[in-house]
Amino acid sequence: MGQPITYFSRSVMLPKEETESGRSRIESNEDSDIDEPMLSEAALKRMTCINFIKRELQPKFRRSIRRMQKQQRVILAQTMFKILFAFEKSINNKLRSVYGEEMRNELQHEFCGIAGQIFFSSELISEVIDIFSRILKFSFVLFESTQNCKRDTSFRRKALLLERISACIHMIIQKDHYNVGSKVCKEAVRIASMDIVGDLVRRACKQPTEQSLLTTLEERLNSLKKWAARLCIAQELYQLHNDLKIRMEKSVVDLLTKRIFDLVIVHYPESGDLIDDLRRCMQNNAGYGRKKLTKTLASEVERRLLHVGMGTRDILQGYASAVDCLRRLDPTCVIMQHICSIIRAYIKKRPDTVRSIITYITGEKREELSEQLTKKHSTIVDEEDMIGVNDELICDEDGEQNWREWQPDPPDAAPGQSRRFRQNADVFNMLVSVYGSKDLFVKEYRQLLAERLTKSWNRDPHFELRYLELLKLRFSEGELQQCEVMLKDMRDSERVDHNVYSSLPFPISARVISSFFWPKIENEKFNLPEEMMSGLSSYGKAFEMHKASRKLEWMTGVGCIEMDIELDGVTVPLAVSPAHAAVLMLFTSKESWMISEMTSVLGMEKRNVRKRLEWWQNSGIVTLTTKSGDGESETWCLASASSKMDRLRGEYDIDDDASDEEKSEDTSAVDALEQYWTYTKSYMANQEPLKPERLHTIFRMFASPGQQGPSLETVIEFLQRKVKQNLLSCSNGLYKVVRESAAH
């Protein structure tokens, strides 16, 4: 009590940014008792003004700031301007009333600085920064909306708001005003600019442009610099340049990770540019978001791709997209191997996977995969053969050239996994790896090649030869030898056709095969019409003249016949199976046939005759005139109208015309398995979820000696029936018993 307070004397000026100790002395003096008679007149005036700021204005300022927390951003900017201006005006009025004619600008600047230290105290600073960052974010929206727009009333209103926000910044940071730039402005600019960059990234991701995402964002960051220059905060923003770039790239990773399934599985290769941007952002930030991306994609793949409602072909398409896209995203191929292993483990459980893969590789995507096969990749090696091999010690030409660019595997790489196996993987190699071994792939490819070569409407031996040569680049010598012999048979057969052509009553193109090298070909035996047999007989005799030691055995159920069908003046060229042609050619001798007669003449099973007749009926060629209960006396004749024949000009499928009798027989086969349901249910209740193949093996053991037992398709249909009855559940191709409580 009573000691002089020297720091309030006229001769002591507050520095530009007062030290913490100075601020604490000002704040701690709020409730102190001062022995005013011991103070000079100047010190007394000074004390009066400071007490006014602390006791009168500070509480009002605090209340005003806290009321602003809930205000909308448009009102917020105007309110902040009014508050700062009003409180500065109150300080000036007080100074004039106290100092009178002694009032100077320097005195006004000094007390505004003192007010800044008092108003923006530690207990209020976070709230002020929050409000000010909101104002800055709003100012950027205003700034963007005023660029390249018409100068109308709306423009002038926005420009006025920008000027007021700029004035607020000026009052906060300038020495002749509150002078608290380091306390408020710097942090508010940091918060606002980070949020603005995040918003720019979100908008850029939602509104794709022709140029890359990163190029678009860099252009928009330039507008951020112009905004900072307009508000006189360019220096504060410049100091944040590196932080803002990191924020931008991490935001890109976070946002694209949320869409990673669509980018990788659904929209690739259209999404290729975004994948490149994502890769650069991750690489620039030490693999930021890599773990989250892998986890998100794995979860989405299991949820959206790997379920019973998704067709095997669609899963294979997603698998191929994942291989291509993830190789592009992650050159180490670690992410690709992880995601593809999940898909591979699921798809192996599907009964149609093997055939679907070989059809996909050699049919639907054969042109695209042909390009991949020509690229330089190593021979396919089964993954199991590479376990435990230190491939860092295996050198190749590329490795010697690029050794300076060598990088260690990322932390998420599986221990012991071969880098060479991983990085040599492409779509073809990865699809083959689904089989588990190359031998299974070669076996299935050989079977499909045989089917394609024996059907004229699907045969392209020149492409098959070219494709086989490409396959040989990926397989060891001799693994595709049987396929080479099959294609050689095609070339030899063409030469035979040329040699015997002149001695034939009509053109015949036969395929003479070396049965030892071909897989088993299903051949339906029946009697061909005499006209067709005479042509085959002529071909056989001509062949024996050129190949005296060999004789042909005709497989009449294999191949196709190209014919022109004329009915009521309408002619349609068509290629059908020999069985379909044989059925139709009977109607050239007479227009009406009973099905029992046709069965006898052709030596064909009744259900197969009916199947072919129904196909021709759907095509508008024949019609059923008389139907009987036993089916023996059904009468078929040529149709009198040809309106449906135009259908034959388009695509057709002669293999999917199953008759009602066949369908009923399939249903009977499923019904026959009902007698084993009690045993099956008890067996499955004590097991882990089972594959249909396992149950198929069990059901075949129940068959009587000499009987084949149910087919796998019949077993699957039976299991699906139980799923519909809520007695079994199916997940990822595995079946298990539903608990009684769940079933009811």
Image (cartoon, rainbow, N blue to C red):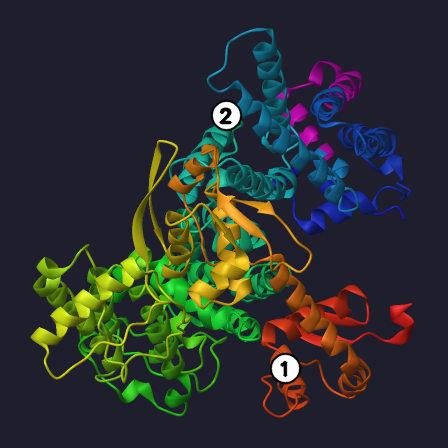
Q: Residue at x 19, y 73 (%)?
A: 489
**Image location (x, y in percent) of residue 360:** 41, 62
Which badge, 2 or 1, comes first in the chain's sequence? 2
Write down the residue under mark 2. Answer: 230
Location of the C terminus by quadrant is bottom right
Q: Is residue 614 left or right of residue 374?
A: right
**Residue drawn at x 68%, y 89% as measured from the top left:** 702
| Residue 653 painted magenta | no
Frontmost residue, 501 versus 9: 501
Asked whether the viewer can see residue 426, the reply is no
| Near-viewer residue (319 or 540) | 540
Q: What is the quadrant of residue 79 in the picture? A: top right
Q: Residues within 10 Å of mark 1 (few under 14, many from 20)?
A: some
Label 2: element kind: helix
Relative to 331, residue 221 above or below: above
Magenta range:
87-115
Q: Position of residue 714 (x, y in %)?
A: 64, 72
